[in-house]
Image (cartoon, grey):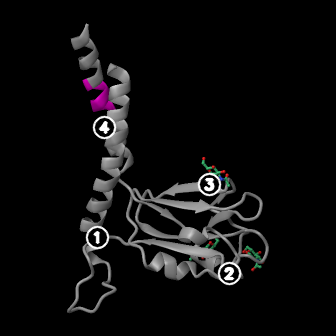
Amino acid sequence: MAMGLIEKGLVMIFLCTAFHVSTILGNVYKVGDDAGWTSVGNFDYHTWSSSKTFDVGDIIYFEYTPGDHNVIEVNHTDYRTCNQSRPVVTYTSGNDSITIKQRGHYYFICGIPGHCEEGQKVDIRVYPDSSTQPSKAAPSAPAPSKSNRVSTLSFMALLGKLSTVVVIFHGFTY
Ligand SMILES: *[C@@H]1O[C@H](CO)[C@@H](O)[C@H](O)[C@H]1NC(C)=O
Ligand SMILES: *[C@@H]1O[C@H](CO)[C@@H](O)[C@H](O)[C@H]1NC(C)=O
Ligand SMILES: *[C@@H]1O[C@H](CO)[C@@H](O)[C@H](O)[C@H]1NC(C)=O
């Protein structure tokens, strides 16, 4: 009886761990960080995105009050001219998570009149191969390794997830 419960618990740990590991493979980037997605305050989204190293599997998260803003993916031409007449995809929830599925250069603008012109536009560049990405540091001072940063972040996230699993396990057996 007790063994059966423990075995079920172990299976549950395995399933939960497998599930959680699969959800922490990508980083989540909130556009604008604390500023969010806004036309107020002349936030420089290009500088924001240039400071990140995006990769396939990462999630780009736009947070805003629905109706006050939106997110329209456009091509480079329409990004430069703030033209929303040919949207690739339109998002309006205020909680828009976009998973990067392949490498490339992605362009998003706010479609509320005037907002893109005020600077509410962001380009997300996912380099063809992160090892060939131009270094932002001087040649004599190599940029910090992305893989170290990612593995540290993933490890921290994993610790958080595992504590959840342990709680579930205890709840299951006792
Ligand atoms: C954007 O789309 C328009 C219409 O299809 C096209 O004329 C323009 O060349 C495109 N721009 C880029 C950079 O692909
Ligand atoms: C946006 O693009 C469409 C399609 O090319 C064009 O008809 C329209 O004039 C453009 N609008 C602006 C404001 O440039
Ligand atoms: C986004 O989702 C969170 C959590 O589900 C919720 O609390 C928040 O109100 C949502 N925001 C918008 C703008 O829908």
Residue drawn 29% across and 67% down? 149
Q: Callout 1, which amino acid?
A: Lys
- Residue 27, image x, y percentages: 40, 59
Quarter of the render that holds ligand 2: bottom right
* Distance (Cα) linking label 2 and label 3: 21 Å
Which numbered disc, 2 or 4, marks the residue that appears first in the sequence?
A: 4
Residue 129 on image: x %, y %: 30, 70
Label 2 sits on residue: 41
Res 125 → quadrant: bottom left
Quadrant housing the C terminus: top left
Labels 4 and 3 touching (C-beta < 8 A):
no
Q: Which SS does the magenta portion mostly show?
A: helix
Residue positioned 42% across, 74% down in the render: 52
Residue at the far top in the pictured view: 1
Marked residue nearer the N-terminal end (1 or 3): 3
Question: Residue under circle 3?
Answer: 95
* Mark nearer the viewer, 2 or 1: 2
Q: Secondary structure at mark 3?
A: strand
Q: Quadrant of the N terminus?
A: top left
Residue 117 vs 60, above or below: the answer is below
Where does the magenta region start and end?
10-17
Instruction: Determine if the C-beta at disc 1 is less than 8 A from ligand 1.
Output: no
Tell me if I can see residue 107 in this picture. no
Q: Is mark 3 within 8 Å of ligand 3?
A: yes
Residue 59 got which mark? none
Determine which residue is flagged by label 4: 18
Helix, strand or loop at label 1? It is helix
Q: Which residue is mark 1?
A: 146
Position above or below: 83 against 58: below
Q: Position of residue 153 (x, y in %)?
A: 32, 60
The residues bearing labels 2 and 1 have C-alpha atoms spaced at a distance of 30 Å
Q: Is tag 4's residue or tag 1's residue first in the polypeptide sequence?
A: 4
